Every structure is written in structure tokens, then in C-alpha cells.
């Protein structure tokens, strides 16, 4: 058995592990970092371009982040939090581009306006209230609102073609939105890590066992899926950033903090159009309202994507149910995750989320004709033969105990760390990748507390992320200066 030693072990070759690896290697180049990935390539599960929404989730257009209260007012707190987090992510990418640690930004991020689009008097009223509240805040300065059909034709030509002229419609637009190919981004970050002598990538390698040692380090047994060779890695810190696979790995660790956590897997599908004559007519991301009972990842949108340098249109996603936690996982994943400490929360969630269950069953049995009918709400002239069905990635929503000891379903991401900070796992889904940098700052602050408090690390963190330690939600001038730099560096300046 091969024996290896690491300061940091990253489990999973997606955007979360790559982001943490890059940040730690900048904070301390002497750290020995090993990344373990079960597939033959990095960024081929949830991070892959075809497996995620790629919006650069910034709260600009996702209506599920701005719920309407019982008094019909609109709550924008979640949108503010997500927007500020994405601004943090843009700062790190800008630093990496400026220092030649990432390639030309167009290799992984491109300017694409973000639109919210609704129809019906009640929804139009909601969108206008949302616009008034959001545009008044500096984070969403410049957001536009229109009910005018001619203006909307300029914003989203495909969506307005052959539309009923009597229909009540409205849209908002943020011109400095973006499309992100997180797969390409992650591969470039891992390439950068490869240039460091203290980094090692182990592909086709599955974690079989995680055990805490008496000296507080971790012994991790890894098996190569092809050669069957086993390795034992002794690591001072372990990060479980394996997407849907993080929960089973967290359970293997046996840390007390794992108790009560479960997972609810949701699959997805897209309608994809690659015809150039259609694709070139739509240069934006147009988000609508989710169906009642739908999970947040199922908010419908007609979406311009640039994946591996090739433009396409995606519509969806259409949710489905599977017992797999990963796209290339096992049908036994869900059943294997059920333990004595999470059985009650998982049963409680199942009993109290029948709307979601019914919604997923309906989605599973949809026909191609029904999917295209949904598409025609966004593209009235869509033809069935122009669109093909493609499978998206797996998402595992968090199930955890509530204050009453029962279960609740969480839509978002959550960091679970051991009390001594030697192991951390990131659970959950959307907004996920777009807030990776803020999530990894949380990991560093919780698990490298003694180091981040030292001047050397703090100064380096502020060099990578100038807003570190400050609030972009509260500081108008800071946000203005930060955004001017990032939009310029990453080529995202809005153009009519």
C-alpha cells in the first residue's frame, strides 16, 4: 500500500475543492495539497457545464430568491446575500486573471444580461414591487423594468415573437450579468495547481475509509478504480467537496456534527437547441417563476450558454427523482445514506413535502410534447424538432433536524465542520458554484482560524479579495470600486 502525507486533502475534483486549493496555495505555497477525484477527469459531475445552470447566480433574475410575504411585500434579503457573495467570487477570479493564474476571461465567463420575465396581472405586480425594492439598493443599481412590448422585443426577441398582444407581461434586466462555464473554470484552476510542486492530483480514485487518528490528523484510504491499488493518505485537514457524494463521505468520518443530516436527491433535464440561426437570436438569460411545489433548482429559464466555447440555448431544467446522489453514482446511494441518527428527519421531510413529491412525479412522466409546450411560454414559436433532451447533473438537497427534532428540507448550501476544524464538508446545491469563494472563506475562517488571524494570511486574503472583512451590502462606495474593477477585468461591462 502506498503511503502519502498531506497538509490538505481535497476530496472531489469540482469547483469547490479547486477554489479552496487555489486559495490555500496562494495563502501558503508550502502546503502539501492532494486532490482525490473518483472520475477520470476533474469537473465532470455537478461542476460540468452541461450539469449546472451556469448563471453566475447573482440574485439578479432568480425569482425564488425574492419571495413574496403574506402582506404581498417582497423580501430581497436572500438576493442581497447571494449578490454580495457572487461579487466576492468575481474578486478572486479577477485577481487570478490579473496574475496570469487564469487565462483570458472569455475562456470561462462571458457577459450575458440577466432577465426576469412574467405574465399575468398578479405576477406583473409582483415583479414591479420586486424591481422597486431591488433597484433602490446599490447592489442592484441599474436594474431596468419594462412592460412595453417594443422594449421587451429588444431585450428578448425570441420570447416576444408571435406572443399574444393582449397578454399582460413585464420583465426586468440587469445588463452586467454573466454566463459562467464552471467546468472550464475548474479545469483551469486545477491546471494552475498542477504548476505547484506541492500539489498532487489522484484521478479515478475512490475514498473507501476516513478515520480520525489520536494526533487529530486523518487517515484516508483511497482505491484506484482501474488498477485497484490502494493508498493511505495521512492528512492534517480534509475537505469533502464532492457534491452529492459529500454526505456519504461525511457519514464515513463519524464526526458528531454529521448526526441528523440526510439528503434528498433531485435529477434534472434540459431541452437544448444548437441551431446557429436560432441561438444567435437570443443573447440573454430569461428566468420565470417556478411552479408551485417545485424545488429552487427547477425555476424555468431560457438560457444562453457558452460551454467549451460553443454557444447553445438551454430551457428547463425539468426536475426528476432518482436515488443516485451523483450522475455517475449508484441507485443505492439514497438507501445507504439512511442511518439511525437521520431516519426520523428524513421520514418527517417525506411526510411533510407531498407537494414536492407530486411535482417530481409529474415531471418524470412528462412527454417531449409537454416539455416543448412549457418552452413555448418563453419562446412561442419553438418547434419540437429543434430541441433535444439532455440530462443535467444530480443535486442532493439537505435534510436536517429542526428546532423540534423533526426534519426540514433546506434549499441551499451548508458547511458542516468538526469541532476541532480538521474536517469540513459542503452539503447542498443552489446557488452552489457561484458562491464558491465565500463558502471557501467560511471554511478557511473556521478550519484555519489560527492562521487567518495572522497578518501574513490576512494581508494575502485582502490582496485576493479586497472587500474581505467588509460588507458589500452596507458599503456603497466599496461596492462601486470593486464592481468597476471586476467588470473591467473580466470583460463584463454592459453594452447595449
Image (cartoon, grey):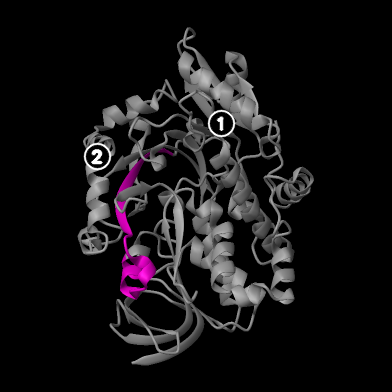
Q: Nearer the viewer, residue 160 or 199?
A: 199
Magenta span of residues? 248-273
Say if residue 162 shows up in the picture.
Answer: no
Q: Nearer the viewer, residue 155 or 335?
A: 335
Quarter that holds the C terminus: top right
Residue 374 image position (x, y, % from top left): 35, 27
Residue 294 image position (x, y, % from top left): 35, 36
Residue 475 image position (x, y, % from top left): 74, 46
Which mark is drawn over residue 84?
none
Foreground mark, 1 or 2, reads 2
Q: Is residue 210 left or right of residue 98?
A: left
Q: Is residue 255 magenta?
A: yes
Q: Which residue is mark 2?
A: 357
Query: Which residue reaches farthest top?
Result: 166
Q: Which residue is mark 1?
A: 115
Q: Is residue 38 magenta?
A: no
Q: Is residue 444 left or right of residue 413?
A: right
Residue 212 image position (x, y, % from top left): 38, 83
**Residue 13 to residue 134: above or below:** below
Quarter that holds the N terminus: bottom left
Q: Secondary structure at mark 1?
A: strand
Q: Is residue 427 left or right of residue 15?
A: left
Amino acid at each position: 500500500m502506498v503511503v502519502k502525507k498531506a497538509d490538505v486533502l481535497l476530496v472531489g475534483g469540482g469547483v469547490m475543492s479547486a477554489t479552496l486549493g487555489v486559495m490555500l496555495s496562494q495563502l501558503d505555497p508550502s502546503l502539501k495539497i492532494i486532490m482525490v477525484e473518483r472520475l477520470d477527469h476533474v469537473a465532470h459531475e455537478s461542476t460540468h457545464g452541461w450539469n449546472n445552470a451556469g448563471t453566475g447566480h447573482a440574485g439578479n433574475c432568480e425569482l425564488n430568491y425574492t419571495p413574496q410575504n403574506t402582506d404581498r411585500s417582497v423580501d430581497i434579503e436572500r438576493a442581497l446575500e447571494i449578490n454580495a457573495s457572487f461579487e466576492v467570487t468575481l474578486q478572486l477570479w479577477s485577481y487570478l486573471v490579473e496574475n496570469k493564474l487564469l487565462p483570458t476571461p472569455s475562456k470561462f465567463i462571458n457577459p450575458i444580461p440577466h432577465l426576469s420575465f412574467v405574465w399575468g396581472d398578479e405576477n406583473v405586480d409582483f415583479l414591479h414591487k420586486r424591481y422597486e425594492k431591488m433597484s433602490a439598493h446599490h447592489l442592484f443599481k441599474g436594474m431596468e423594468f419594462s412592460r412595453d412590448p417594443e422594449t421587451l422585443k429588444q431585450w428578448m426577441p425570441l420570447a416576444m415573437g408571435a406572443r399574444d398582444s393582449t397578454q399582460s407581461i413585464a420583465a426586468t434586466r440587469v445588463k452586467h450579468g454573466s454566463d459562467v462555464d464552471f467546468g472550464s473554470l475548474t479545469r483551469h484552476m486545477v491546471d494552475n495547481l498542477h504548476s505547484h510542486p506541492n500539489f498532487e492530483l489522484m484521478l479515478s480514485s475512490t475514498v473507501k475509509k476516513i478515520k480520525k487518528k489520536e494526533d487529530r490528523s486523518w487517515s484516508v484510504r483511497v482505491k484506484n478504480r482501474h488498477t485497484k491499488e490502494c493508498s493511505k493518505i495521512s492528512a492534517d485537514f480534509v475537505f469533502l467537496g464532492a457534491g452529492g457524494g459529500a454526505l456519504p463521505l461525511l457519514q464515513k468520518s463519524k464526526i458528531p456534527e454529521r448526526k441528523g443530516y440526510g439528503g434528498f436527491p433531485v435529477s434534472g433535464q434540459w431541452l437544448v437547441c444548437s441551431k446557429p440561426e436560432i441561438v444567435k437570436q437570443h443573447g440573454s438569460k430569461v428566468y420565470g417563476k417556478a411552479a408551485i411545489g417545485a424545488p429552487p433548482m427547477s425555476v424555468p429559464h431560457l438560457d444562453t450558454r457558452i460551454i467549451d466555447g460553443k454557444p447553445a440555448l438551454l430551457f428547463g431544467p425539468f426536475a426528476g427523482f432518482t436515488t443516485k446522489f451523483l450522475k455517475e453514482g449508484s441507485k443505492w446511494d439514497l438507501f445507504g445514506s439512511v442511518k439511525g441518527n437521520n431516519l426520523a428527519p428524513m421520514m418527517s421531510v417525506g411526510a411533510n413535502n407531498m407537494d414536492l413529491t407530486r411535482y417530481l412525479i409529474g415531471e418524470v412522466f412528462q412527454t417531449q410534447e409537454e416539455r416543448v409546450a412549457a418552452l413555448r411560454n418563453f419562446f412561442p414559436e419553438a418547434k419540437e424538432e429543434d430541441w433535444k433532451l439532455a440530462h443535467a447533473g444530480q443535486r442532493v438537497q439537505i435534510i436536517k433536524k429542526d428546532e423540534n427534532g423533526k426534519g426540514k428540507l433546506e434549499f441551499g448550501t451548508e458547511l458542516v465542520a468538526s469541532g476541532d476544524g480538521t474536517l469540513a464538508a459542503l452539503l447542498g446545491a443552489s446557488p452552489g458554484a457561484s458562491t464558491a469563494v465565500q463558502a471557501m472563506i467560511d471554511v478557511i475562517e473556521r478550519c484555519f482560524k489560527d492562521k487567518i488571524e495572522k497578518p501574513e494570511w490576512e494581508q494575502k486574503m485582502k490582496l485576493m479579495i479586497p472587500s474581505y472583512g467588509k460588507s458589500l451590502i452596507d458599503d456603497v462606495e466599496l461596492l462601486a470600486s470593486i464592481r468597476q474593477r471586476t467588470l473591467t477585468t473580466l470583460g463584463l461591462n454592459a453594452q447595449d
